[in-house]
Amino acid sequence: MTTTSLRAPETHTAGFGREAKAPTRTLWYALVTGFGLVLPLLVNSPLLFTLLTQAAIGALLAVSVGLLIRQNGAVSFGQALYFGLGAYGVALAVRQGAFPIEVGLFLAIAAPSLLAFGFGLVIVRIRGVAFGMLTLAIGQAFYELVGRWRELANGDDGLAFSLSGRIFGAPIAWVQNPASMFVICWLVLMLVLVALSSFARSHYGTLTLAIRDNEERARFIGYATVLPRALVFALSAALAALAGVLFALYNSFVSPDILHWSYSGAALIMAIIGGTRFVWGPALGAAIYFFFKNAAGDFTEHWPAIIGLTLIVVTVLLPRGISGALQTLIARLYRRRRP
């Protein structure tokens, strides 16, 4: 059957604003990346870089949630499953010592991705709240499994492991030092954002958007719809697993808590605050989330209430998130400057 061109409705997923062209996007990404690289040269605070490293890892997890919302129109409450499996994959690879750490890192990302693809072939056929509840049920099932499987995962006590030698030719100390680990996480985050920006503008990315908006029409003109949605689900799981790998390398400890649905909920809050219309929106939301969390935590133990209030305000007043509000502001300023 001959297929026709399929265009998705206008969606600004790739740039820093509606009028942003490729050179402008490249410049913005270069400036933001450079800022992260020079920050350790300007600031000497292990505590600050510990917080920034956590924020960068959280941003990766939030970006994985945002990808699923933006490309599939689906909300997952089980993203922590793939985050946790990635982290546990590193811990088990190091403790078992059956193969080099580099191979272990690859498997820690590949295995959750394949698992998600298998799940995705089934559950992406389901829309709306039912999809979210299924991801929640699957995630909690694995949380209970890991918490009770003492022989493999040491149950609720978690797994501590020790890294030594080199990884990808670099000293292991690089992933255990707050400043250098922040640079690593920052570079990984920027590379992921650039890759997702390219994916969003590609034919396949546009196809997934069209399937999201009108799956019946896409199927009618000859496109398969289940496989692209399952692949997006697997890609989002791979990003979550990548975040879990970085988390495990930095902390040298994993526990079942990182598979709990609350981790998924936090990532979803980050994505909503930042906005999912743009690739970088959830990452911005993660930075705001961690800033509020640590700033409010210094004054009160009820910081979740402040996060909740922030979420309500953003949802009501800024339905496209803070990134959408920034895009609107930039577009207005750009129009005013034009002759």
Image: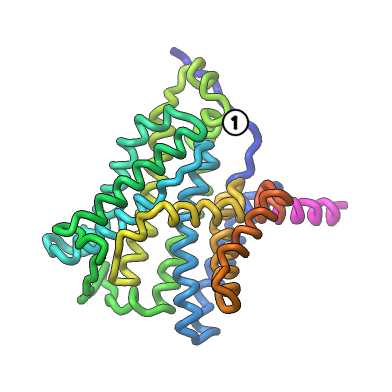
The residue positioned 47% from the left and 77% from the top of the image is 49
Q: How many numbered marks are there? A: 1
Apparent side of residue 329 relative to residue 241 in the rendered image (left or right): right
The residue positioned 25% from the left and 50% from the top of the image is 145
Residue 13's spot in the image, x, y percent? Answer: 59, 45
The residue positioned 39% from the left and 59% from the top of the image is 243
User: Looking at the image, is 182 positioned above or below residue 116?
Assistant: below
Image quadrant in which you'd find residue 302:
bottom right
| Residue at numbered disc 1 | 8
Residue 279's spot in the image, x, y percent? Answer: 55, 50
Check disc 1 and give the amino acid type.
Ala
Residue 189's spot in the image, x, y percent? Answer: 46, 60
Residue 130 lies in the magenta stretch: no
Image quadrant in which you'd find residue 85:
bottom left
Q: Can residue 30 be seen in this view?
A: no
Query: What residue occupies the far left of the structure in this picture?
Result: 98
The residue positioned 55% from the left and 29% from the top of the image is 210
User: Looking at the image, is 7 positioned above or below residue 97?
Assistant: above
Residue 331 lies in the magenta stretch: yes
Q: Which of 268 and 187 is in front in this view?
A: 268
Q: How crowded is mark 1: few (under 14 residues within 10 Å), some or many (20 or more)?
A: some
Name the chief secondary structure element in magenta. helix
Q: Nearer the viewer, residue 303 or 14?
A: 303
Magenta highlight range: 326-339
Residue 183's spot in the image, x, y percent? Answer: 44, 72
User: Looking at the image, is 300 positioned above or below residue 207?
Assistant: below
Image quadrant in which you'd find residue 170:
bottom left
Q: Is residue 69 visible?
A: yes
